[in-house]
Image: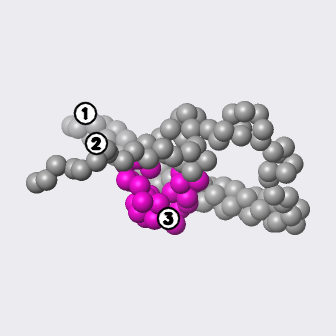
Amino acid sequence: MAAPVGPKKVHRYTNEFKIQAVRLSLHPEIQTQDVARALDIHPFMLSKWKKDYREGKLNPAAEAAGLSLPKVLRAPKRDPEKQALRRQVKQLEAKVEARMAVRALERKLAALEVEHDLLKKAIRFNIERRRRNSSS
């Protein structure tokens, strides 16, 4: 195998580039390997950037310098109708979960009642058997 000719190439990536790469890889429908391949970087490097991002070591330079946009400009305005619908959906989901929990508890109660009745019958049976055995 031939020795490499020339100095080793070392790429220096900006924090903005790293953060954009991390945000792309965090998308639920895009795999980390695909992002790394598209950006021509090693998947391990992208995984390290993701870890740094989670730990807060990787911050955009603008935010670090205090030059970030105000929250009013950063966040898109939400539609009040969509928010109301989301709240209704969450309330309905909570009701469904509560009903499912109630049904599960009712099934458990029915099983415990049957078990309780069987135990009472077994106790009565044993008491009567002891009476018969002791009187003979």
User: What is the three-letter code of the residue carrying label 2?
Assistant: Arg
User: What is the three-letter code of the residue carrying label 3?
Assistant: Ile
Label 2, secondary structure: give it.
helix
Front: mark 1 or 2: 2
Residue 30 marker:
3
Residue 88 marker:
none
Q: Which residue is mark 1?
A: 134
Q: Where are the magenta residues, as a range?
A: 20-47
Image: 79 above or below 5:
below
Looking at the image, residue 112 sits to the left or right of residue 72; the answer is left
Residue 7, image x, y percentages: 31, 44
Q: Nearer the viewer, residue 1 or 88?
A: 1
Residue 111, image x, y percentages: 47, 54
Point out the tag, 1 or 2, that comes first from the N-terminus: 2
Q: Residues within 10 Å of mark 2 (few under 14, many from 20)?
A: few
Residue name at image x 28 percent, y 42 percent? 129
Front: mark 1 or 3: 3
45 is within the stretch colored magenta: yes
Label 1, secondary structure: give it.
helix
Instruction: State the separation of the CA atoms marked 3 and 2.
Output: 72 Å
Residue 129 marker:
2
Q: Residues within 10 Å of mark 1 (few under 14, many from 20)?
A: few
Residue name at image x 41 percent, y 63 percent? 37
Point out the tag, 3 or 2, that comes first from the N-terminus: 3
Looking at the image, residue 75 sits to the left or right of residue 126; the answer is right
Q: Are marks 1 and 3 in contact (CB under 8 Å)?
A: no
101 is within the stretch colored magenta: no
Looking at the image, residue 114 sits to the left or right of residue 87; the answer is left
Using the rendered image of the protein, determine whether residue 121 is visible from the camera's viewpoint: no
Quarter of the rendering containing residue 100? bottom right
Instruction: State the separation of the CA atoms marked 1 and 2.
Output: 9 Å
